[in-house]
């Protein structure tokens, strides 16, 4: 718990951290609570799909609300990754990591303190998502019992695994590169260009094990019934295992980089 206190002390006194967290919470809240209205404005070539009624998607109704909002919430994980990257790279910019080691903190202790920061961000985001789903679900579901309310709530667990793993990847890149701008750029490039292009050139059975693909497959688009007959009815626990394996691998790589590099 001492390592958690150390990380909290750093974050609490860091103004940029609070600005980014506030920005994240505001955007997160506005988009998720306004998702149904947003879907109501969907058009294709300037026209609404024949017979399309956003209310029929039950976006904010139990039990679908867990799947719907967890999927959309995943798009904001990059903002949390930026927070992690800035907090870690600043340790090198201001040489606080070297001072921590001089003061008696081991490298593994430093890594654990940063992992605590990752878990806090992921947990905070997950609790916020849980609260929004619960409020919107109760507000929009005509009749609900305990079983119906928490049916499909496992998507919240999948969301936590998705965000935590993504932030651990961001942590690894931060420790390896040490420059916030370069790290953010590389993560952006890999997430949205490099891996998607590589996935197109390889069989799905192979690309599914890529880190970003593994995370994206955890919670698949809940609105696919608009365009195809495929629909993810429940969380694929095999995918959760693959994502958790990536979290372990990138944590081990983070320790290797931290141990080998000069502080």
Image (tube, grey):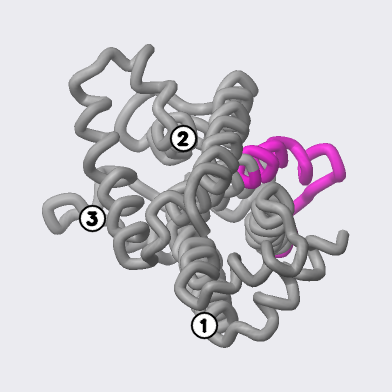
Left or right: 75 with respect to 26?
A: left
Q: Nearer the viewer, mark 2 or mark 3?
A: 2
71 part of magenta stretch: no
Q: Do the CB atoms of the residues marked 3 and 1 lie less than 8 Å apart? A: no
Residue at screen point 52% across, 52% down: 171
Part of the protein shown in magenta: 135-160
User: In the rendered image, which residue does mark 1 sit on?
Assistant: 16
Residue at screen point 56% across, 78% down: 17
Sequence-first tag of 2 and 3 = 3
Q: Nearer the viewer, mark 1 or mark 2?
A: 1
User: In the rendered image, which residue does mark 2 sit on?
Assistant: 220
Rounded to the nearest whole Å, what is the CA distance between mark 2 and mark 3? 21 Å
In the depicted view, which residue is nearer to us: 121 or 100? 100
- Residue 2, percent from left and from top: 86, 63
Rounded to the nearest whole Å, what is the CA distance between mark 3 and mark 1? 38 Å
User: In the rendered image, which residue does mark 3 sit on?
Assistant: 43
Is 235 above or below relative to 145? above
């Amino acid at each position: 718990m001492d390592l958690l206190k150390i990380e909290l002390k750093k974050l609490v006194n860091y103004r940029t951290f609070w600005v980014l967290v506030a920005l994240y919470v505001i955007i997160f809240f506005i988009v998720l609570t306004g998702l149904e209205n947003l879907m109501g404005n969907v058009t294709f070539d300037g026209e609404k799909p024949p017979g399309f009624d956003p209310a029929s998607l039950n976006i904010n109704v139990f039990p679908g609300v867990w799947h719907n909002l967890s999927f959309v919430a995943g798009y904001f994980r990059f903002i949390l990754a930026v927070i992690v990257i800035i907090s870690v790279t600043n340790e090198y910019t201001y040489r606080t990591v070297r001072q921590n080691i001089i003061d008696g903190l081991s490298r593994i202790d430093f890594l654990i303190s940063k992992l605590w920061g990752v878990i806090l961000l992921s947990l905070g985001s997950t609790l916020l998502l849980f609260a929004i789903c619960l409020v919107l679900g109760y507000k929009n579901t005509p009749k609900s019992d305990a079983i119906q309310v928490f049916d499909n709530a496992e998507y919240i667990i999948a969301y936590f695994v998705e965000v935590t793993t993504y932030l651990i990847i961001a942590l690894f890149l931060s420790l390896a590169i040490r420059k916030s701008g370069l790290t953010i750029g590389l993560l952006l490039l890999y997430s949205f260009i490099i891996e998607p292009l590589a996935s197109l050139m390889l069989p799905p059975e192979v690309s599914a094990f890529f880190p970003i693909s593994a995370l994206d497959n955890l919670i698949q688009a809940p609105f696919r019934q608009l365009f195809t007959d495929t629909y993810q009815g429940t969380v694929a626990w095999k995918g959760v295992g693959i994502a958790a394996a990536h979290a372990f691998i990138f944590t081990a790589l983070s320790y290797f980089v931290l141990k080998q590099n000069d502080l």
